[in-house]
Image (tube, coloured by chain):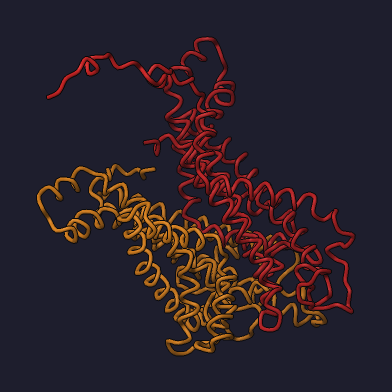
Chain colours: A red, B orange
Amino acid sequence: MNLTSHSFEPILQKDAAANHIRPSMTYRQDAWRRLKKNKLAMIGLYAILLILLIALAGPWLSSLSYSDQDLMATNQSPSAEHWFGTDNLGRDLFIRVLYGARISLSIGIIASILNLTIGVIYGGIAGFFGGRIDKVMMNIVDILYGIPVLLYVILLMVVLEPGLINIFIALGIAYWLRMARIVRGQILSLKEQDYVLAARTLGASNWRILFRHLIPNSLGPIIITMTLAIPEAIFTEAFLSFIGLGVAAPMASWGVLASEGITSLRSYPFQLFFPAMAISITMLAFNFLGDGLRDALDPRVRR
Amino acid sequence: MIRYMLIRIFNSLLVLLAIITITFFLMHAIPGGPFTSEKNIPAAVLKNIEERYRLHDPLWKQYIDYLGNLIRFDLGPSFKYAGRTVNDLIRESFPVSLQLGVVSIALSILLGIPAGAIAALRQNKWQDYATMFFATLGVSVPSFVLATLLIYIFAIKLSLLPAAMWGGITYMILPALTLAGQPTAFIARLTRSSMLEVLAQDYIKTARAKGLSPFLILYRHALKNALIPVITYIGPMAAGILTGSFIIENIFAIPGLGRHFVTSIYNRDYTVILGVTIFYSVLIIGLNLIVDLIYPLLNPRIKLNGKQGE
């Protein structure tokens, strides 16, 4: 072995990395960082923001309205004038898809906010008070859980008559169970934490502990459930529209547009293609974002 | 164990009663009777009809009567089609739906489980990405879009398969594929994630260290354990395929129960809506009950203290 004096030089610390202390991160920063690393989730997020922007601003960009008919230009193929073509009454499909975005998205968002409100309050109370209250409340949820939900949404729509507000009501009533279960489970495990004891020692009331401490700390699973509930609501509305229980004409959600497109599939396939694409892209975006959020927010899958 | 089963059965019966009650009173809360849409019915005829359907009885008496009939499996007559009962309708059309449903379930299991298992074994390789891509797509595309797409390609452009109607295997391929789409995607995702979890367990390492063949490890140790969560999905899957059939049977003009149900919604044929909803509910709840009762037998880790795990 050939040893020179060079071999005995101490190795200097070359990089500062070993000494570098990582700045501490809050849970939210950590989650956001992880979400940003997930490409699909970010694509989903940007796609949703874009769709929202288009839905809000889009209809102003054109002088046409969703109900404007031009009987001289019915069933036209996509062109520079009518980007998505026209339907059998000469209505511009592009405009109708834009307005449809408003309706479909607002159905998704409002229905999931309703679920959120009912589910969080119900699950929160059950989990927080525990004991007999919890047992009774969760037994009710278990029993309702056995009911095939979609059938009941259909029944409600038959009873309530089709219409936008009634869709909100039916979806809100029907889909809060999962949220309630998740919130309850979360609260149940959180309420044994020391900071709850600390808050209680400081004299905080039950409601304050529940709404200021426990529910904000269960936000992760709540947000995940909500993100995945929105596409489900949009889906359900499309389904309802298809069996004739959706919003009333001339308003049209994507579901209505798609089911109108199906009737003329053989002659004018583009009339189905565009609304179907709109639904599928939105679903895909929400699913990507939901999956990404689950990976980013759920501490159980942190490895 | 026995206690758990009894509680589950009791709960299911309670759910059924709740469903029947909710459905019954919802249907009767609709303003106007079922005959208000028919114009120009002579008052005497209307009176006779109402007499026949006992619409003059107080609501609670109608409810008791209906329950009594239900116990004898009598769902009552159709309001819109004279001389036909809801039972006739179900007897005629349910076998078609059942056939379609069973084929779809079989398809989604046969396609979904291997796809998920392969994706898990080749995690982060192209097989995984491809499977997950199709699975996400499958969850994102509404069934009626998938249906029309398949009809467009295979029936209109390629003229390989019939676009609609019923009779023979060729008629079944497209609707069954459409119905199987979403559950297949779901099962693939479920199998993949539970398979990944199982593959990380110590006993898989032990099996490998023992020198077992990869096939044996995969089949006997990994897949068998990974499939336990998939079994719980059978209940929701059946429900999904059932409701999915409403749309699919309409698009493909299949004379099944789903199509009749949608027609009865269009016609506001209340007894049929009521009867079919109850029939479907019994079916789904029964299936869920069976799955719940079998589940502990397959998964001995579940504690049976009469409470459902969650």
Is B243 situated above or below A165?
A: below
Residue A128 appears at what percent x and percent y? Answer: 49, 28
Of A106 and B276, nearer the camera is A106
Which of the 4 image quadrants contains residue A189?
A: top left
Residue at position x 37%, y 68% from top? B111
Asked if B238 appears above or below A142 in the picture, the reply is below
Q: Is residue A298 above or below residue B90?
A: above
In the image: residue A230, left or right of residue A54: left
In the figure, residue A268 lies in which quadrant?
bottom right
Q: Quadrant of the C terminus of chain A?
A: top left
Residue A43 as seen in the image, left or right of residue A195: right
Q: Position of residue A280 (x, y in %)?
A: 60, 61
Q: Position of residue A132 (x, y in %)?
A: 44, 32
Q: Residue furthest top?
A: A202
- B101 or B138, nearer to the observer: B138
Which residue is farthest left?
A: B210
State the image quarter where residue B129 is shown: bottom left
Which residue shows up at 77% across the image and 67% down it? A83
| Residue B51 visible | no
- Residue B195 coordinates in the image, percent (x, y): 31, 52
Q: Which residue is depicted at the point 65% across and 69% down?
A: A242
Q: Quadrant of the N terminus of chain A?
A: top left
Residue B63 visible (yes or no): yes
Residue at position x 38%, y 53% from top?
Answer: B10
Total numbered labels? 0
Camera-side residue: B306 or B56? B306
